[in-house]
Image: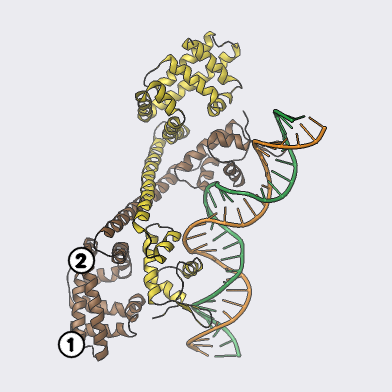
Chain colours: A brown, B yellow, C green, D orange
Amino acid sequence: MEYTVHQLAKLSGVSGRTLRYYDEIGLLKPARMSSSGYRIYGGKEVDLLQQILFYRELDVSLEEITKIIHHPDFDLVPALQQHIQKLQDKHARLEQIISTVQKTIESKGGGISMSDHEKFEGFKQKMIDENEEKYGKEVRDKYGDQLMDDSNAKMMGLSEADYVRMNDIEKSFISELKKAYETGDPASAEAQKAVDLHRKWLAFTWPKYSKEAHAGLADMYVSDERFTAYYDQHIKGLTVFLRDAIYVYAGK
Amino acid sequence: MEYTVHQLAKLSGVSGRTLRYYDEIGLLKPARMSSSGYRIYGGKEVDLLQQILFYRELDVSLEEITKIIHHPDFDLVPALQQHIQKLQDKHARLEQIISTVQKTIESKGGGISMSDHEKFEGFKQKMIDENEEKYGKEVRDKYGDQLMDDSNAKMMGLSEADYVRMNDIEKSFISELKKAYETGDPASAEAQKAVDLHRKWLAFTWPKYSKEAHAGLADMYVSDERFTAYYDQHIKGLTVFLRDAIYVYAGK
DNA sequence: ATAAGGCTTTACGCAACGTGAAGGTCAATA
DNA sequence: TATTGACCTTCACGTTGCGTAAAGCCTTAT
């Protein structure tokens, strides 16, 4: 039996455009062309199309399918294993996303404002990842794996109520810090009060406090442009002022 | 603090191109343009970008994000609920795909040929779905829900070994049918032997055999172009011949 | 003054087709 | 036989979220 595009299309459930496209990219060529230039497909092509659709169902790209179909000695198993890896990654990521969206929806019923919630759920993991990436090695070298792992765990375990309190404290901290900046003295009472709030704020994510780590963090603030940008957003030079105040606080 | 594209890009982790694109589609416009035409972003834009990236992480389309961000009274919860639905569908589908790919890989170790396996795993559920869609109502009306459900269940429970045997039987059936066609007589011994093989083949997916259902299936074969195409692929007119032979077999 | 590095707009490319547009072909009917 | 109407063909643009040049202006440092 022979089929034109539309016939094969109806037979297989794909569109005519799809078949022309498959012809175009060399995935499925018609058996022959009629005298008037029509595409004519035969039984062999029907079978091939079945196989193509099978792999397509599995989310394999048409490029991969082309290799699979047209090279009988194609190394299928490793390719599929790699493919399954990607699928599983996607799967895990979706799971995470779904849970985040669910929490986001729930939070709309509760007292936590949307923007808080966004900042909370959306960036928690990201913060940990970035933290790990940028400072992980340094911190692990300096203070050991335990501290870093504990810190990450604590971050993940943060409740939303905690998060709200943490945010409140940070706001107080920023406002105190700005006031302190006016004095121009990192050792002033105002500055030290601000740093104390900073310490409390850190307590939410730090499993164990140490003056050395606090001072180390101050260095990071100054050297990392994202932190600098964040603090200098309020007043230019605030980051350096904060570092100096922490130095005093930590007795460095 | 003010930022140029590249500065904000580094700060937030996205590319400059992305920021220009967001400007272009009206998702995130710079606070102002410098005298020389540079994009200048402020603290407000930094916050907005954070929110944008949050939703982007959740696989929300930029179009949706635009609505969410720029219309404070946007009805977020139903939108997110709808979104979560899509995510869950994707998630479930991925699960199914992963399992199929896994089985596909496993089968490469066993004795079942790839092509058999493809046909088996990939189309089993699809067959059921299509079956249900096309004939479900008719069959359920005629023979009751139980038969249809049982049939679907039996199909899903088919082992691969069964599937191989099923395929063998179908091959014999086709070859017998072709021989029978030569005789031109649907009542010939050859034709009836073929129909008997057809019956055995059916037994793999039919929970209970009945002559009425068999004859009904023959009608479907003739009226459905996919079946017609399938059988007429071998010899034109074979479908009608098969129907007539089944009629005789079923005493209709 | 010149080079380096930032910025700009313009525009093609990616995946897998959907959706016309403009025009040829084929079978059946008035 | 001429004309529908239903096919078929080849362009070619639109989709999503940017990556990646290309060509040229702006700014800063040497």
Q: Is residue B245 above or below residue A115?
A: above
Q: Position of residue A252 (x, y in %)?
A: 20, 84
Number of other residues with Cα within 10 Å of mark 1, as a class: few under 14, some 14 to 19, many 20 or more: few
Which residue: 46% across, 14% down?
Answer: B196
Tag on residue A189? 1
Q: Quadrant of residue A208?
A: bottom left
Q: Quadrant of residue B157?
A: top left
Which residue: 19% across, 78% down?
Answer: A197
Q: CA distance from mark 2 to mark 1?
A: 27 Å
Nearer the observer, A88 or B73: B73
Q: Amino acid at mark 2?
A: Asp
Q: Quadrant of residue D9?
A: top right
Tag on residue A2? none
Q: Which residue is mark 2?
A: A162
Nearer the observer, B128 or B193: B128
Q: Position of residue B126 (x, y in %)?
A: 44, 35
Q: Secondary structure at mark 1?
A: helix
Nearer the observer, B6 or A78: B6
Q: Amino acid at mark 1?
A: Ala
